[in-house]
Amino acid sequence: MAASVFRDSPSSSRGGHSEVAQINITPLIDVMLVLLVIFMMATPMVTGRIDTRIPQPHDGPASTDPPRQVDLQVDGQGRFRLDGIALARADLPRALGDLAHDDPRAIVRISANADADYQDFAWTLAEAQRSGIRQIAWQ
């Protein structure tokens, strides 16, 4: 005698109750949808790039003197110091352009105080790149 998996079948009415075991996939679908939303929100943040270039060897005559290193500091009040000299925001692009023109091998090290605004730091980095400085380090 074959047993049926359906509740209303004639064989199930003869004595016992037979139940159908089913897997509930609703929690699985909920978890998958939440993961999908998380990945959709995180993907644009991961695709951001910072342009970094590795120094390439050149075939020209080797220079024995090291390049000049210049410190550029950003403080919390939006003020800038280029090698210890205080500069206004409007004067910084011109000073960086003069530096790039006078010494193309100069290394500019940009640092910011703990209370400095990120926008000021990012603007300083962009201005250094726009002025033609090729070697930029940040701390």
Image (cartoon, grey):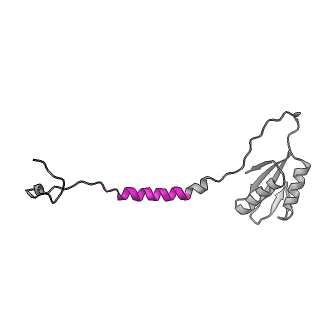
Q: Is residue 46 left or right of residue 20?
A: right
Choose between 32 and 105: the one closer to the eye.
32
Compared with 67, 7 (above or below) is: below
Percent x, y of residue 30:
40, 59
Residue reaching furthest to the right: 102
Using the rendered image of the protein, determine whether residue 122 is visible from the camera's viewpoint: yes
Residue reaching furthest to the bottom: 77
- Per the picture, the main secondary structure of the magenta-coloured stretch is helix
Name the residue: 74% across, 44% down: 53
- Look at the image and say whether residue 124 sits in the magenta stretch: no
Choose between 65 and 93: the one closer to the eye.
93
Percent x, y of residue 98:
90, 54
Q: Quarter-wise, where is residue 126 in the image? A: bottom right
Name the residue: 75% across, 54% down: 111
Numbered circles on residues, count: 0
Percent x, y of residue 14:
7, 56
Percent x, y of residue 59:
85, 33
Q: Is residue 16 left or right of residue 81?
A: left
Q: Which residues are magenta?
A: 23-41
Name the residue: 43% across, 56% down: 32
Residue reaching furthest to the left: 14
Using the rendered image of the protein, determine whether residue 116 is visible from the camera's viewpoint: no
